[in-house]
Amino acid sequence: MRVPSPSPGVKFLAWLTVRVLSIPFVLGLALHHGSRRFGVELPAWVSAPLAASSLPMYIAYRVLRKNARQRREAAAMGARFAPVVKGKWPGSIDLIGMMVYNRKFGYPGDGLLELFEELDSPVINVRVLWMDALFTVWPDHIKQILAGDFSNYEKGKRFQYGMESVLGTGVFNSDGEMWKFHRAMTRPFFSRDKVSHFDIFDHHADAVIAIMKERMRGGYSIDFQDIIGRFTMDSATEFLFGCCVDSLKANIPYAPDVLFPPPQSRGEQAERANKFIEAFNEAMQAIAEREILGYIWPLYEIFRDTTAEPMKIVSAFLDPIIRSAVEKKQTAGALAAEKTGEIEAETLLDELLQSTSDPKVLKDETLNILLAGRDTTMHVTTMVIYFLSMYPDVCTRLREEILTHVGPTRRPTYNDIKDMKYLRAVINESMRLYPSVPFNVRDCINATTWPSPDPNDKPIYVPASTKVPYAVFFMHRRRDLWGPDAEEFSPERFLDERLKKYLLNNAFQFLPFNAGPRICLGQQFAYNEMSFMLIRLLQSFSSFELDEAAFAPEARPPKEWANFPGRKGIDKFRPKLHLTMYTSDGMWIKIKEAPNLEEA
Ligand code: HEM
Ligand SMILES: *[C@@H]1O[C@H](CO)[C@@H](O)[C@H](O)[C@H]1NC(C)=O
Ligand SMILES: *[C@@H]1O[C@H](CO)[C@@H](O)[C@H](O)[C@H]1NC(C)=O
């Protein structure tokens, strides 16, 4: 008989019982039996409360001891403490509630931004349940974490544990030697010839444009986030496996305000693609929720592992592909052994097969890359189209650059894209204001110090085993780093005198792809993919218009937001976060077709 493995919640409770509740329990037993031995029978109403109070006393003792040790260590390092956020409740647990609420209903960073302003510091200690979390938005600190002192920071066991049921162990979620192994195995493929990548983008981009034209001619709006998410899914899976999910062939949603959508029947295969995408999204959502809940996430999964169901569907798609690739390699391997020379890998899976034949390693690694590459690219491309709809002048200028460099119909090449400065600036500016990974976190291993933002002040003490969250989202909008117009959408800032004045002084203030040894592996791939798609779109369409009425009411920004300064007051969609940023209910737009220049 197969014994079902216990849910994450049950495992966590068992741990909690052994590690924490055992203290009052053992003390209670000792009081009870000990008192008998000495002939004074302690009644239960005395020994039980005594035993129960031992737990808070034990915690208080641990906290005081830790504080004293930190004071000594900081003094020895000649450092000072970062200002500590004071919550209203013991252990500042009210802050967890605030963050969970804002995750659901707020603008990214709501609540946190106020804390930074209140304490008037670019680094603050958000100490919840007496555990330090040094939150920073200062470029020099982020530089130290990601590059300068890279080996003293890790993603950590907690991060890995929460993701394990979906991602296993791969380049995105491992640390140390394991991470080095995965990174080395995966990297070569990204530096290979880019021409074949363009073949992949090309036929999926054609499908996107055909669908958009059909909707436009029918007078319908289109959810750009949805369709571009299908484009990045199909492109990524083809790049990884050489065959794609074919989600662009599935049924594409109509806006909620379309009462009688025309029937779509794209067949059974199509529904499988939509199911796969749904399951993939659900699994990602589930691991993101674990991240937000932190240490206590297993308590929310007492009865079931929330990733189990969606992962069944994801595996049903991936497992056969990987199995057949391994089999193919085994037969080919016998042949290739006779010849010398390497076989040129055509897909990332082929590349990985040169290092391993372990199906679990192959599956984990490809899922890691699908996670890292799909939603991120979807989001940035969606933001670009949103900004083009908001700022028609930018759209016109970008279209001019495209028509000058590539013309109205030709397929863009790698060299075209390299030379298109304005396109790159528009993409950069969109990632500056709405980076795909707005908040990130590492664990600091050994105690260290960070330079003080005020050069005349002592450095900041960072205790060992501390969480160090950092917010690219805030850093990208700081007026002291970007100038008074930091919250304005202005692609020219990457090209005019502002470039020299602000960005070139400090490359670490712009980090859409992270930096250092763990910089995004797919950065070049993503720039190419997004550029290719945007060029194709602007060759076919001359302008975009946001269709605010098509958004479900709860997906529109609340009226009060209009009173806020900066982007929160300006923007007309609701940004949301799981592991990466996306927009609530998509991005409904109406499109104008470009005059057919070929016929003219
Ligand atoms: C605009 C699109 C993209 C953005 C903004 C982006 C951003 C990022 C960021 C911020 C990280 C660091 C995450 C962390 O350390 O916590 C990262 C890592 C990574 N990205 Fe991307 N990414 C994009 C597209 C892609 C694509 C298309 C691929 C692959 C096809 C990819 C593959 C990876 C991988 C493998 C890692 C992990 C690297 C490591 O930890 O060593 N990314 N990306
Ligand atoms: C942390 O400190 C220990 C003891 O001093 C040392 O052995 C270890 O290499 C350090 N780890 C890192 C990542 O610096
Ligand atoms: C865009 O940002 C990248 C860094 O990610 C930088 O190397 C590049 O020069 C920028 N280009 C333009 C035109 O903005």
Image (cartoon, rainbow, N blue to C red):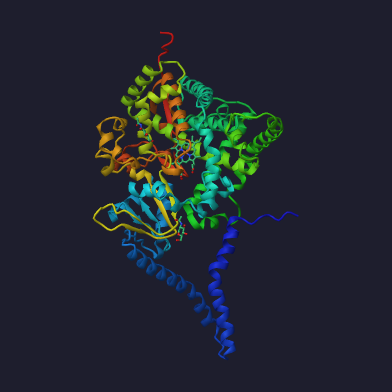
- Check the picture and name the quadrant holding the C terminus: top left
Residue 599: percent from left, percent from top: 43, 8
| Depicted 244 relative to depicted 435: above or below | above
Which residue is situated farthest in the bottom direction here? Answer: 39
Residue 82: percent from left, percent from top: 32, 58
Residue 380: percent from left, percent from top: 42, 34
Question: Which residue is at the front of the view, 599 or 527?
Answer: 527
Question: In the drawing, does residue 117 fall left or right of residue 587?
Answer: left
Asked whether residue 537 appears in the rendered view, the answer is no
Residue 525: percent from left, percent from top: 47, 31
| Residue occupying the point 37% across, 44% down | 472
| Depicted 341 relative to depicted 54: above or below | above
| Depicted 518 relative to depicted 43: above or below | above
Question: Which residue is at the front of the view, 524 or 97?
Answer: 524
Give the tally of numbered discs.
0
- Check the picture and name the quadrant holding the N terminus: bottom right
| Residue occupying the point 48% across, 23% down | 212
Residue 120: quadrant of the picture? bottom left
Which residue is situated farthest in the top direction here? Answer: 600
Asked whether residue 415 appears in the rendered view, the answer is yes
Question: Which residue is at the front of the view, 189 or 64?
Answer: 189
Residue 107: quadrant of the picture? top left
